[in-house]
């Protein structure tokens, strides 16, 4: 049941407006609760969960965020719908405890951030405790990969059947306002309304597809013949890469291209090791890589001038990222240890923008021409919202996984390393964007990480059992 729930939710989440809505996060919490309850209902799963450090670290972190929620230091009330200006009040709170923000749940507040973290954590813990077979990892990879292909195909459909509606039938609340003021070039990637989040999801799907390619090659070597499945999967990887390119995400293009090049290098190395040097042996792989890049590039240049413009922008200067980071560092200095509270960035940042003279516009309500819901750097925003103490817990969890993967490097194999490279790309991407604030990306990242570690552990157990 846990495997079915995890796989189903991985497929469904990105179709709920990219997993960015409050109701997608709430459904993720429900799925996580059901999955965790199903996992612990089996007696032999309980010791596995109790010995899982991420269970205890995550529990402590969720308790930390819950304390912020119960102890609000800031109450934000919108002055005018859609204007991103709030009337701020400062309720009495316990200053030496973690404190958060009380605001509209649909906009963002500390409770919503708690829900966003709790769902993937519960689902991940359930998956860790319940999975016993290597085939579960491959099954999850297949679902993620096929989902990525579907999202990319829908995105291609937008090009040939233009629409201002998500999936041709839905207008997101507020989206009609954007279109009326001239944002008609807004790009959708599947049901994602934020293209960078879509690209982050798609290159994880691409990593899963490339892992399946190596899985198919391993099976072909085991039986002594190649069914051609690996080449079929690679064509699907090309479709996913086309979706990444259409998104116009510079990080997506960089990391997706990196994964493709890494896979070709690995295939060439395997060919040299097994069959000796021959250019003919890896010409098909190089040819396919060239074809994917040329096809995606031609498609991009011919039908997505907006994406070309985005890709041509300087990564650091576009969207004022440097200014966002500068202001976020100043916020961290003002509340370094306990932070401002989960979900507080959008309410606190305008004060710092005005203080630093960033994005001024005297003709708008609030005096700003631009504001941001996120700092475009998860590391900085985690530290700003949860403080050094809360962000330190998240860092400990990441370091735990780095150590676990490093200790299992011998048993990862080519397919495992492709998934690890995709996960590493997400971590690097989070330094200049906010993939971990997206339910779809966070859920897929969590399950792929656990699946690859589980697979490597089972590989080690099988080898040591011989």
Image (tube, rainbow, N blue to C red):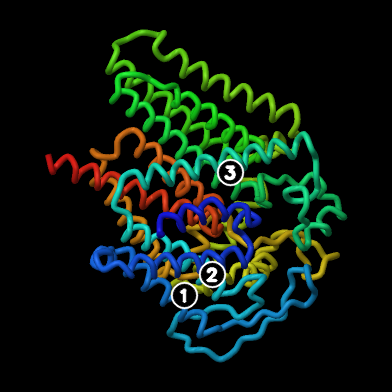
Q: Residue beneath label 1, please?
A: 65
Q: Position of residue 39 (x, y in %)?
A: 35, 65
User: In the image shown, does 190 or 255 lie closer to the viewer?
Assistant: 190
User: In the image shown, does 360 or 31 lie closer to the viewer?
Assistant: 31
Q: Secondary structure at mark 1?
A: helix
Q: Quadrant of the C terminus?
A: top left
Q: Residue beneath label 2, please?
A: 113
Residue name at image x 46 percent, y 46 percent = 428
Q: Is residue 241 left or right of residue 192?
A: left
Q: Residue beneath label 3, please?
A: 199
Task: Compute the Cα span from label 3 to label 2.
Answer: 22 Å
Task: Compute the Cα span from label 3 to label 1.
Answer: 28 Å
User: In the image shown, does 122 or 400 lie closer to the viewer?
Assistant: 122
Q: Secondary structure at mark 2?
A: helix
Question: How many numbered badges does the structure rendering display?
Answer: 3
Q: Quadrant of the N terminus?
A: bottom left
Whether label 2 touches label 1, CB < 8 Å = yes
User: In the image shown, does 243 or 99 lie closer to the viewer?
Assistant: 243
Residue 140 vertical placement versus 244 (above, below): below
Residue 31 vertical placement versus 79 (above, below): above
Task: Compute the Cα span from label 2 to label 1.
Answer: 8 Å
In the picture, residue 63 is in which quadrant? bottom left
Residue name at image x 56 percent, y 29 percent = 238
Residue name at image x 24 percent, y 42 percent = 459
């Amino acid at each position: 049941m846990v495997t079915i729930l995890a796989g189903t939710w991985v497929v469904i989440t990105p179709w709920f407006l990219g997993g960015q809505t409050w109701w997608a996060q709430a459904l993720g919490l429900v799925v996580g609760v059901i999955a965790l309850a199903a996992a612990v209902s089996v007696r032999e799963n309980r010791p596995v969960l109790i010995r899982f450090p991420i269970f205890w670290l995550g529990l402590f972190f969720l308790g930390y965020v819950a304390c912020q929620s119960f102890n609000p230091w800031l109450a934000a009330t919108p002055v005018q719908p859609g204007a991103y200006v709030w009337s701020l009040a400062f309720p009495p709170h316990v200053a030496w405890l973690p404190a958060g923000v009380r605001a509209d749940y649909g906009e963002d507040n500390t409770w919503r951030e708690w829900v966003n973290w709790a769902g993937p954590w519960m689902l991940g813990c359930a998956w860790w405790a319940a999975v016993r077979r290597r085939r579960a990892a491959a099954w999850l990879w297949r679902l993620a990969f096929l989902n990525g292909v579907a999202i990319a195909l829908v995105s291609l459909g937008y090009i040939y059947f233009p629409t201002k509606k998500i999936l041709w039938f839905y207008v997101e609340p507020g989206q009609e306002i954007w279109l009326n003021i001239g944002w008609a070039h807004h790009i959708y990637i599947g049901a994602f309304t934020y293209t960078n989040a879509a690209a982050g999801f798609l290159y994880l799907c691409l990593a899963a597809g490339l892992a399946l390619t190596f899985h198919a090659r391993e099976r072909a070597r085991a039986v002594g013949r190649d069914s051609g499945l690996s080449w079929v999967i690679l064509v699907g990887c090309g479709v996913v890469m086309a979706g990444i390119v259409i998104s116009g995400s510079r990080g997506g293009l960089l990391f997706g291209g990196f994964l493709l090049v890494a896979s070709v290098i690995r295939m060439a190395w395997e060919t040299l090791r097994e069959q000796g040097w021959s250019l003919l042996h890896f010409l098909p792989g190089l040819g396919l890589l060239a074809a994917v890049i040329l096809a995606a590039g031609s498609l991009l240049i011919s039908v997505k001038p907006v994406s070309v413009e985005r890709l041509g922008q300087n990564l650091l200067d576009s969207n004022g990222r440097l200014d966002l980071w500068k202001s976020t560092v100043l916020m961290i200095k003002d509340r370094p240890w306990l932070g401002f509270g989960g979900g507080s960035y959008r309410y606190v940042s305008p004060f710092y923008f005005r203080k630093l003279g960033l994005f001024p516009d005297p003709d708008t309500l609030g005096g700003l021409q631009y504001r941001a819901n996120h700092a475009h750097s998860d590391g900085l925003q985690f530290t700003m919202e949860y403080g050094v103490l809360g962000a330190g817990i998240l860092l400990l969890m990441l370091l735990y996984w780095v150590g676990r993967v490093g200790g299992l490097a011998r048993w990862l194999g080519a397919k495992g390393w492709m998934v690890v490279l995709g996960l590493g790309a997400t971590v690097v991407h989070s330094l200049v964007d906010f993939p971990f604030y997206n339910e779809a990306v966070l859920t897929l990242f969590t399950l792929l990480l656990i699946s690859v570690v589980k697979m490597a552990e089972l590989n080690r157990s099988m080898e040591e059992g011989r």
